Structure formats: structure tokens, C-alpha cells
Amino acid sequence: MLTLLESLRAALASIRAHAMRSILTTLGIIIGVAATIAVVAVIQGFGFYLGGLFQGLGANSIIIYPHQTREQYLAGQIARITESDLYAVKHDVAGISNISPVLFVAQFAGGVTWHGSSSSSQIVGTNKNYAKARQASPRLGRFIVPTDNLQHRRVCVIGQTVIDNLHLPANPLGKYIKASGEWCRVVGVLKKRGNFLGNDLDNIVIIPYATARSILGSSKPPNLMIQLTVDNISRVNETVARIKQVVTRNHLLHGLPTGNIRVQTAKEFTQQFTSILNTITFILGGIVAISLLVGGIGIANIMLVSVTERTREIGVLKSLGARRKDILLQFLIEAVVLSLLGGIIGTILGWLLGMLAVHVIPGLTVAHVPGWAIALAFGVAGGTGILFGILPAAKAANLDPIDALRYE
Amino acid sequence: MGDTTMRVLHGIDCEVKRGEYLAIIGPSGSGKSTLMNIVGCLDRPSDGSYHLNGTDVSQLVDDDLAHIRNREIGFIFQSFNLLARQDALHNVMQPLVYRGMRIAERRKRATQALSNVGLADRLHHRPNQLSGGQRQRVAVARALVGEPALILADEPTGNLDSRTSDEIMRLFDELHARGHTLVIVTHEHDIAQHTQRIIRLHDGNVQSDTLTDKAKDSAHAHPA
């Protein structure tokens, strides 16, 4: 333990003595870690968005949402689900209930704030049926009621995370919070729902659908998602087919592009989401492996230079009684400290890149860097240091003291 | 170069007693360095044995030799060989690190050793902020701090001007007076004359092993 601390001190002194060189050396690690953290942040942000669409769904839930392929997007065929689709489905599809519109209010319009605290929560405009389809019943107060929508009331129902983030009192009923620039009175608090696919289901502000529409402005019809439940779960497939038929017909009637909506059940979604996550994880693994390999070679290289430069110093330390393992430890720790330094800088840089991505990529509302990504980045950076530091350190430890002392 | 065995020393047979002050002199190529490396436990003799403080160290493995160097030998080099990035105090503390000594104790002993060589006011100067003589004093403090059985100086005044050389040699005389065992390897006769006994090497053999006037003086001063 004592020698470990001593080696750490020596390593820091040596890195400080060559500050510029050390930073350049760790560049490989910095870039690798930064890339990983940034990509994780963005992916998690998308996951936050996607997961939000399906959070708390029962097995009988169906979600209708707009989706276009890249080709359709380039051809200007932007997918769109309108209120008329909602009414068409409501009236023409049998065996469904709890139908509700879901309208996301973008967070870059200001997020949710109260008395100087802010929360990057999802803001959802919907109606009373949402509570049943999403198992979102209130613990305090009430849920959105039909009159809220009729009168465009500025009210909201919030999750526990919002209370925590905004430092609201335990019973926040009657308080006014600012959601996307509008003051809304808190009328209900949801029961805690926990996490779903890594998303905090309690980080949500629910407002009446009509209010959400007014916040977004009336210049163009909102792009919706529709959520409903199937009464008889064995008829899910038939219901999905019928919904597609009805929406397509409605789009044809209104001159909207067809074939770019998705009707998805909870089960399907989970499978899709998992497969996407697996692909992303695989790609991430590749990026990390390559960049850390490059970074590790950089560290091995500079450590070899350092050993050669300090041959005489190693000879002196040996003459003073340093054993093989003392020298080995000193250089190994130096390599590990270098890599961890890269890990720290890379994490900060990656986090900043993720934040930047939120502002640049449309549709991405929040970037989130999970603790495991940081732990992984550090673990792998440290491991790289050990792996690539061992060769130079062993070279230093095995130097003959006489030759080392005589080295010019 | 490399692993070939060169027979540099031939049948050197001598004994250094505790508290002795002696010089090994000889022209270059006479085997001084090789003898010093063996005496300093940096190298093992290919033949024969070397007993230091009662243990035969000629057959020990590298890490055990490192242990012996740490405990029993204090090196002083011609080019000082201080750690450039560390201040005087940390340079002197370094040998104690390998003893697993606590930092407070290390600091205490190193401070004491530095004030013993007259550098109490230079604890936090780095080698490049010190004069040659001061650097060599730091090196002496570093050699002394572990209370070794033997202080081994390799051309200790080789990089110093004559005035500073005298200063360092007076310091050595003082150390001798305090009871330390000193072996100085040099090619300068003036330096050797400070000691009590001179071993002269030539072509790997002991050419002569004589007591100096000083030894005779001190024998007069302290009749045994």
C-alpha cells in the first residue's frame, strides 16, 4: 500500500513534468472514450424518446405513430397522423377502447421549471383515457378530466421525479410550474411507476391535449400518436390490420401520403427495441475497441520512450534498493494514470458532445449519460493502461543496474 | 558487450573492517569499477565470495541484492545522480521508501541527514537550484540516511572544482571520525591521501595495500 501511494506520487510528478506530451499521448484514449460517451448519450436520448412512447404499456396496448423511411423523407413525404385519423379510428374500428391522442411537447422550448429549479421531463398532451392505457393513476389529486380539455385549462399531472427535480413540496397540488413556457397548476401526482427499458416513467408532465395544442400554436395541425387498447387480446392482429385500413383510407380522403404509419403492439416494440439496442451496442463495442487499441499503442510507445529517457534514473533507483517490482509498479501506475486521465478528459468531452448533439439533431430532446457508461469507460481505459503499460514497465524493471547507471 | 564473461579481476583478497576509511586507486582499466560494482552489490563475482556484514552476498538473486543495497550500502557517484524532478528532501527520502517506512518517519530522518551535511536550509531546492558541492552533499545525505554498513563513493570529487573537492573530502573525514565505514574509488592521489589505507589496483591485481600517514597519526593519537 505504501509503495503504491509512493508510485502514484512519482507517476503524477512524471506526468506533470511532461504535461503537453502526456495530453498528446492520451489523445487516442480521449477520442475513444469521448466518442463512446457521446454516442451513448445520444442513443440513450433516443431511447428516452422511444421508450416514452411505449412506457407502461399493457400487453393489449396498441400505438399508432407516424414513421417514414429515409427515401420517403427525402421525397418530402413526411409521415403525419392528424386528429381526423383519431376520429376515424375511434368510429370505424370495432373492439377498441381507451383511445387517446398523445402529443409530445418539445423540451427545447424551455423544459419544466419552478422557482429556479428545472427538470428535463417529457411533456405529454393527452386526455383522460391515457390513465387507463398507461396505468398512470394519480396518487394525489386527480388525472386530466374531459372539462380540462374542453376549457383548455392550464393544469398538469406530474410524476414523482418532477417533484424531486423541481424541489416541489411533498404535496405540490395547487402549485404553478412552468411547462414549455406556460404556467400550469399541478392538479395531480402520479403513482410511482419506476423504470421501463431504462426510462424513468415518473419524469413526466401530463397536460390536457387541448392545452398542448395551444402551447404548440395552431399554425399547422399537430403530428400525433394515437394510443388505444384492444378489448379482446386474441384479436390483436385483426385489429392492427383494421386500423391500418382505416387510417390509409382516411389519408387518401385527405390527400395525405399513405403507407408511412406504424401500428405497433407492446410486444413487437420490445423485440424491435432490443434488436436495435443490440446492434448499437455491437457498433459501440467496435468503436471502443479500435480507439482504445490505438490509444493503448500510443501509451505503450510513450512509456517506452520514457523508460529509455529515464534509464539512468532507473539505475539510480535500483542502486538505492528499488526491487524489480518497485520499478514495475511505478511505470505501470504511470501508464494507468495516463489512461485514466484520458478517460476523465474523454468523459467530459463526450458529455459536452452529447449536449451539443441535442441542439443539433432535431427530434432528440435530451441526452443522458448513464453511470454504467462512465464506469465502463474508466474500467476499459484503466485496463488499457495495464495491458499496454506492462511491456515498458517490464523493460524498465529488468534493466541491469550497472548498465542503467552508465547510460548516457 | 553482452553476456560474455570478462575476467577483469584476478584473486583480489582483502578485508575492510568496520570504521575503516580506505581508497581504491588505479589507472583506468585496472578493474576499479568492476570491484566497486561487486563491493556495492550491483554485480556478482563470477568466482569467489564476498561477505558483507557477516552474509555471503555473492550468490544472492537480484531482488535480495537490492535489499542489501538498500540496507547496507550508501552510494555516492561522480555525477551525483540525484532525481532531477525531486527536491533535496525527497531525494534523500527515496531509499527509505523501499524500506516501507512511514512518510513522517522518512521526512524526519531525511531532514536530519540533510542538516548533518549542512543543508538544513536547502530542503526544498531541486538539484538544478543547487551548486555542484551542494548536490554532492545531498548525495552524501542520501547515502547516510539509511545508516548503511558501508559508504561507497565512486570518484566523488570528479565533477567538482578543487575548493569544493576539499569541502567534500573534509565532510568525508568528518564521517569517518563519526565512525562510518568509507570506501572511495578514485584515480586522484590527493583524494586518496585523505584516507587511512590505499589499495592500488593494476590489471585486476592488487599492486599494493598500504597504510597512509594519517593512519599512523591516528594510531599515535589513539594507541590501541
Image: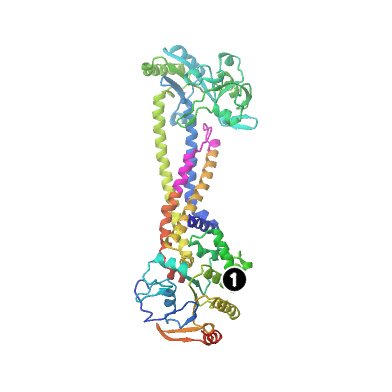
Residue A169 figure quarter:
top right
Badge 1 element: helix
Which residue is nearer to you in this view: A196 or A93?
A: A196
Q: Is residue A315 above or below residue A158?
A: below
- Residue at the location (58% across, 13% down)? A147
Residue B41 lies in the magenta-colored region? no
Q: Residue furthest right?
A: A115
The residue under label 1 is which amino acid type?
A: Asn
Q: Dot 1 corresponds to which residue? A: B116
Q: Is residue A131 above or below residue B97?
A: above
Q: Is residue B102 visible?
A: yes
- What span is colored magenta in the figure? A357-381
The structure residue drawn at horizontal position 49% and vertical position 82%, both measured from the top left corner, is B187
Q: Position of residue B139 (x, y in %)?
A: 54, 70
The answer to whether residue B167 is left or right of residue B192 is right
Question: How many numbered dots are placed on residues in this image?
Answer: 1
As for residue A366 lying within the magenta part, the answer is: yes
Task: Provide residue A383's location: percent of width, then percent of height.
Answer: 43, 49
Left or right for A313, reference A216: left
Above or below, A75 against A141 in this view is below
- Expressed as whole percent of the image width and height from the top left, the position of residue A361 reads 52, 35
